[in-house]
Amino acid sequence: MKRNKPTIVVFGCTGTVGTEVMQQLSERDCMTRGVLRNPERPYPISAGSRSSNITYVSADLNAGSQLKEACFGADALFLLTATSPNQVEYEINIIDAAKCCGVKRIVKLSAPVVHAPAKVEVSQWHSKIDDYLSRSFDDFCCLRPYAFMQNWERNTFTIRHFGKIYGALGDAARNYIDCRDVATVAVNLLLATEELRERSVILAGPQAISNIEMAAKLSRITGRKVDYVDITPAELFNQLTNKAKLPEWLANHIVELDDLAIKIPEPGYDTITNLIARKPRIMDEYLQESRYLFKRTPFWKLLF
C-alpha cells in the first residue's frame, strides 16, 4: 500500500531559514502548510497551482484556537518564531496546539546551550522552550546552530557606506553556517520515516572566522577596503541602540554573542556533513552570491 503524503506545518515560514525550509519541502513528496502571523504577508513560495504542494494559513500566536486550526491534520511541525521577548510564550502556545492536534513530531530551531562564564539571554529563552518540548513530545529534535552566514546582512549599512565592520569580538572567531544547510537538516528530520534518535543536534559550519578575516574577505569581494574596528562591548551596545536604533534586548544579544565566542571558542569544523550527505557551503560561496548587498552603490546610479 502506498504511504500517504505527510503534512508538514512550518512556523516562521517567511524568515531566512523558514523560507528555505518551504522551498526545499516544495520539492519533496509531502504537503506543506506555511503559517503566517499576518494574512497580508507575501507568500515566500508561490501557492495555488494545481500541482503545488504548498498552502498557507494565518494565525495569531496568542490564539490557541487559530494555532490548532494551523496544526490540524499535520504529521510534523517545524517550530520557529522570530527572536523576541515573547518567544517563550509563543512557542509554548504552538507546542500545546500541536500536541492537542495529534502532531507526532516537532523539529525546533533552537540555540547552543551556553555555559558559564558566558551568558546569552536568548539561549536561556530557548532552554525554557526546549525543556517544555521535551516534556510534551517523544519524537522531537532541537537544532542548535551557531551563527548564520546570512546574519552578515545586518552589517551592510556600515560596510557599504563606511567600509567598516564594528564589533567587540577582538581576534576571536565565530562559526558560521549557511541557512540553506540548516534547512536541509530540518527537512531531512521532518520527513524521516523512523522516530528521531537525536533530541539535540549542534549545527556547525565548516569554518570559524574572525571579524578581521571577514574584513579581508569583504574587501576582496567588494573591490574596496573594508576594515574591522574593534570596540568595547559598551561602545557596541551604544552604537546598536543609538545609531542602528535596535531594541535593547537585541543589541544586548549581539554583544553577548561576541562575548560568548571570546570566552568559549567555537568549532572550526562542521558537524553536518553526515546529516546532509555532502559538504556544507563555505563563507566564500555565500559572499560571492550576496556580494551586491555589500557593495557601495555608485553615486551616479542614485540619480536614476
Image: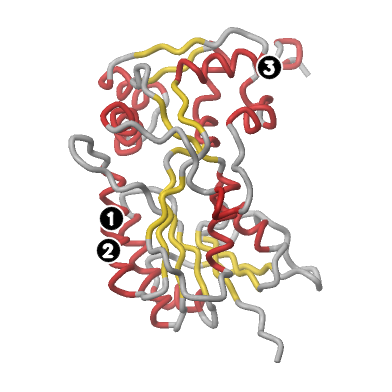
Comparing marks 2 and 3, which lies closer to the viewer? 2
Amino acid at pointer 3: Thr
Residue pointed to by mark 1: 127
> Horizontal placement of 97 versus 125: left or right?
right
Q: Secondary structure at mark 1?
A: helix
Estimate the x, y position of residue 83 in percent, counting from the top left: 39, 48
Amino acid at pointer 2: Asp
Comparing marks 3 and 1, which lies closer to the viewer? 1
Callout 1 touching callout 2 (CB < 8 Å): yes
Pick whichever of labels 2 and 3 is earlier in the sequence: 2
Q: Is residue 287 visible?
A: yes
Residue pointed to by mark 3: 297
Asked if 98 appears above or below 211 in the picture, the reply is below
Q: CA distance from mark 2 to mark 3?
A: 47 Å
Residue pointed to by mark 2: 131
Q: Is residue 66 visible?
A: no
Q: CA distance from mark 3 to mark 1?
A: 42 Å
Amino acid at pointer 1: Ser
